[in-house]
Image (cartoon, rainbow, N blue to C red):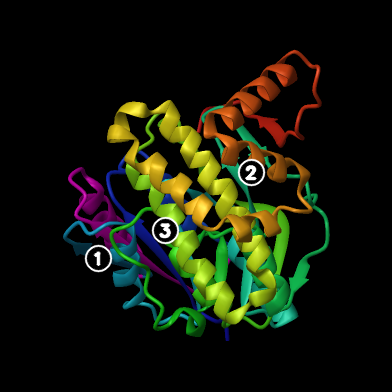
Amino acid sequence: MMQKVSVIVPIYKVEKYLRRCVDSILEQTYTNLEIILINDGSPDQCGEIIEEYARKDSRIIAVHKENGGLSDARNVGITFVTGDFTLFLDSDDWLERNMIDTLIEISQTYKADVVQSAFFYAYADHLLYDDRLYLKDDPPLILNNQELMYELVKNDVVKNFAWGKLYRTKLINGLPFKKGVLFEDVFWAHHVMKRVEKYVIVHQPLCYYFQRDDSIVANYSLENLAILEGLKERHRFVEKYYPDLVNESYKLILKTCLTHYNMLVLHRKKDYKGIQKRKIRSFIMENYEGFSKAVQRDKQLRQQFRLFTIHPYINISFLTSRKLLRKLRLLRQPADLERIELSYRV
């Protein structure tokens, strides 16, 4: 008998994209699905749209709730799950027709607790695929728990995203998403992964991660700093359960601190009196020894760290000059992602 897969889709102000998302689930070649659509108090026509779908397909459960944010909507969705496996999907993203079929087959073949799919960054007129580490036809990557946690902390191969992965439902039971924060997945993923014995990554891109025009650079806000709190919370978890990964954790925190410091400089008016910049700098200096030890084998990050500790603006000047040299082709460009042009707009 086919095992049931529960698909959870939180929905808020996405009437423009919602049908594309839901249709991609309904058209899956794997049919034993439970599709949980959570209208998170959306003020547009999303509620009516999911009711329309629920009337047409008995696999759909339409849930309506007051607005509480992405985490709250996911948590509510989890309470309706009866499937053996669970898949999260954001309502402006969509799936290849064979995604669930492929992930189920991989899970059964390798007896995996979680299967992760590669994905496309989907823009209006093109797609990007990250082929810097693996190619689409490379064999699946199999990770044990220690290897998985290393990759999660490093944040290259295993991302913190909740979406794009097929979970055995028992793994996520009792692990709610933290409410009221951005980057909620950063607060959640490591708790799930601690329970995983075998994790498999499929390099074939099977889902589409839609990139809207409202980029983080143009719409940066202080709420984006929540990712630092998530990484700090995870660091304490790493110190307790995976002490061998402390240096990797420090490195990602440092990279993130430097990135957000630079964003705050770019958006000076949003950081009243420079309070957040001072907090970041104080945190880096308070943890100087940990960061210093962690960057010893990373030449580029070590250089940025030293410049920042002399003065943050020296590091910013260094990064600006390096960007200019790359533009003038006097410095090697970083590897690009594979670009696929589309003959239509998505």
Disc number lying in front (2 or 1): 2
Q: Amino acid at mark 2?
A: Phe
> Residue 323 sits in which quadrant?
top right
Q: Earlier in the sequence, mark 1 or mark 3?
A: 1
Residue depicted at x 24% and y 65%: 63
Q: Which residues are magenta?
A: 30-58
SS at circle 3: helix
Q: Amino acid at mark 1?
A: Val
Asked whether residue 38 is drawn in magenta, I would say: yes
Residue depicted at x 34% and y 63%: 71
Nearest the camera: 272 or 171?
A: 272
Q: Earlier in the sequence, mark 3 or mark 2?
A: 3
Q: Quadrant of the N terminus?
A: bottom right
**Label 1 to label 3, Cα distance in Å?**
31 Å
Drawn side of residue 322 relative to residue 27, left or right = right
- Vertical order, 121 against 118 (above or below): above
Disc number lying in front (1 or 3): 3
Residue located beneath label 2 in the image: 305
Nearest the camera: 24 or 39?
A: 39
The image shows residue 252 at horizontal and vertical percentages of 60, 54
Circle 1 packing at 10 Å, graded few (<14), some (14-19), many (20+), is some
Drawn side of residue 183 relative to residue 200, left or right = left
Residue located beneath label 3 in the image: 229
- Vertical order, 328 against 58 (above or below): above
Q: Which mark is residue 63?
A: 1
